[in-house]
Amino acid sequence: MADNNKNKDKDYISYGISFGLLGGTIVASILTALTNSPLVWGLGPGIGMLVGVIVAIVIKNIN
């Protein structure tokens, strides 16, 4: 039998990616203003996206 609950499951990965990129960009802009280093722009959004995906996976597994 098909799983009828499958369509009701929420997927938080897209929220994790989008808010992680947004948060990483905000943190990167603040750190760039303080340190004046362009390397932060490469690392900030990437690390933010990674953290967002991990948080989304944890939230999905809890629910």
Image (cartoon, helix red, strand yellow):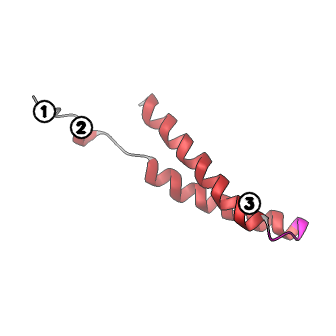
Q: Position of residue 10 (x, y in %)?
A: 35, 43
Which residue position is annotated with label 3? 27
Residue 51 spot, x, y in % from top left: 61, 46
Chain part drawn in magenta: 34-38
Residue position marked by numbered label 2 in the rendering: 6
Q: Residue at x 51, y 34 (%)?
A: 58
Q: Position of residue 28 (x, y in %)?
A: 75, 63
Seen in the picture, residue 42 relative to 15 is either above or below; the reply is below
The amino acid at mark 2 is Lys
Identify the secondary structure beneath mark 3.
Answer: helix
Amino acid at pointer 3 = Val
Please identify the quadrant where the N terminus is shown.
Answer: top left
Label 2, secondary structure: give it: helix
Give the crowd class for mark 3: few <14, some 14-19, many >=20 residues within 10 Å. some
At a point 52% along the width and 59% down the height, the residue shown is 18
What element does badge 1 sit on?
Answer: loop
Rounded to the nearest angstrom, the CA distance separating label 3 from label 2 is: 36 Å
In the figure, residue 39 lies in which quadrant? bottom right
Is residue 45 positioned above or below 16 on the image? below
Name the residue carrying label 1.
2
Amino acid, disc 1: Ala
Who's the residue at 13% across and 33% down the image?
A: 2
Q: Quadrant of residue 35?
A: bottom right
Q: Quadrant of residue 3?
A: top left
Q: Main secondary structure of the magenta part?
A: loop
Alpha carbon distance from label 2 to label 1 = 9 Å
Tag nearer the camera, 3 or 1: 1
Instruction: Looking at the image, tell me whether mark 3 or mark 1 is earlier in sequence order.
Output: 1
Q: Is residue 31 magenta?
A: no
Do tag 2 and tag 1 residues touch (Cβ < 8 Å)?
yes
Tell me where residue 17 appears, x and y as whole percent. 52, 55
